[in-house]
Image (cartoon, rainbow, N blue to C red):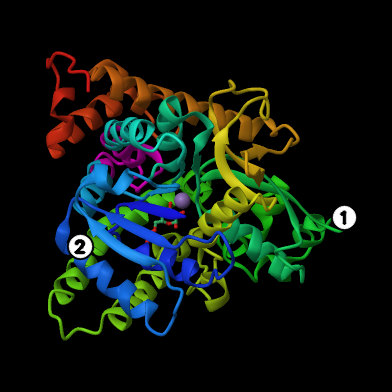
Amino acid sequence: MKLTILGGGGFRVPLVYGALLADHAEGRVSAVTLYDTDADRLTAVARVLAEQAEGIPDAPAVLATTDLDEALRGADFVFSAIRVGGLAGRAADERVALDEGVLGQETVGAGGIAYGLRTVPVAVGLARRIARLAPHAWVINFTNPAGLVTEAMSHHLGDRVIGICDSPVGLGRRIARVLGADPDLARIDYVGLNHLGWVRGLYVGGRDELPRLLADPGLLGSFEEGRLFGADWLRSLGSVPNEYLHYYYFNREAVRAYQEAAQTRGAFLREQQEGFYGRMKDPATPALATWDRTRAEREATYMSENREVAGAGEREESDLDSGGYEQVAVALMRAVARNEQTSLILNVRNGSTLAVLDADAVIEVPCLVDANGAHPVSVDPLPYHATGLVTSVKAVERAVLAAAASGSREDAVRAFALHPLVDSVSVARRLVDGYAHAHPGLAHLRRGTPAAPS
Ligand code: G6P
Ligand code: MN
């Protein structure tokens, strides 16, 4: 099996390779092609992978290239994890929104809309190329905003593109752990959109253990989401939201904390990663150890302002053990390649799963995966409060897709203005101005500029 990683010079690629190294079974991935537009980043990551592979005789062979077509030819799986505009682009997405007094974050709210507007045309270009050069490949999309980008790619790849995220998996594992259940045996009732879902139940041997968690303040205080949202709010909700819902339920506090922070997350990571890739240019730098130190620092500071707002304290070691997206990606590839049925929370087309959304809307939901792909399981309807958020945000995503296709300012203003975390149409207009100014790729959205379809 050949796996091609788009964004192969990305910082998280060693996680994926590490998960592949642990797979020794027949039909495993034996060749990995890293594709990136930046040759220096490819060289840096290839050095880390080479150190990871030391002493492992069946380690997948690694090839790095900046030639997309070469990378795609013959691929059985394509893993897409690109960051359009790099971390500088992310920092600008965050900053423009915060300067307007609304949430500036990688994937949620105005920042996520800007990121989507920048990313969708590139992701669609890749999807078209994959459909042409590797029409039988399965595509695993980790490119954020993952739900929206998966939906855009599905217009060209149908159900052969599957979106993944580590946050629902991590949440499920943490809940199972505090309940004393085996995370691999527990069944999680979770549904929503990417970074916008709720755990409504956790079944062990057919019995729902979630009520036991919600009734126990001690247990609720013992894991990340419990501390982030607080026991009272979780009990009122009757479910455990994805950590990203902190931006909705505690929006005012999160925006203020982000405004007061010395740097946005994107700006912090930009500096951190410039340091890492810079050091990697020196052949004397120990690759794997340097990467691992940088990774640990990144993970320990994840959502630190939100935790501060909540008084949640430092992130605990056990909360860092997410069982990560790389495990999901490898489990997904195994299930498809070997027809080993497994259950995973994935981003796939809705079909008839959530009656309030149309069939083509990509949602995040537990799926049964086999050689024919990922099939969403049937779930209970969402309560009204969650349906409201899910349908609002899906309407925003559709406006982003329309704006990416038409290049029209009007569609872009609609995307920002309809978002529940953007509180005025005037603010939405100024956000479009701000992003058109900050990102050369969005300059066509300036006031008075004729639409320029991508
Ligand atoms: C989680 C999310 C990803 C997101 C990342 C941001 O892993 O599932 O979708 O990109 O967090 O983390 P960062 O360290 O880049 O702020
Ligand atoms: Mn994610």
Left or right, residue 304 beside residue 367? left
Is the C-beta of the residue carrying label 2 under 8 Å from the nearest atom of ligand 1? no
Residue 101: x %, y % from top left? 30, 41
Image position of 346 with respect to 272: above or below: above
* Quadrant where ligand 1 appears: bottom left
Image position of 425 with respect to 122: above or below: above
Give me the disc on residue 454. Answer: none
* Residue 204 seen in the figure: yes
Q: Nearer the viewer, residue 62 or 439?
A: 62
Residue 162: x %, y % from top left? 51, 41
Can you identify the residue that label 2 sits on? 41
Residue for point 77% across, 65% down: 216
Residue for point 25% across, 74% down: 47
Labels 2 and 1: the sequence-earlier one: 2
Q: Which residues are magenta?
A: 97-118
Is 387 covered by the magenta stretch?
no
The disc labelled 1 sits on which kind of residue? Arg
Mark 2 or mark 1, which is nearer to you? 2
Residue 395: x %, y % from top left? 47, 23
Q: Nearer the viewer, residue 209 or 231?
A: 209
Can you identify the residue that label 1 sits on? 207
Quadrant location of the C terminus in the rendered image: top left
Picture quarter containing residue 197?
Answer: top right
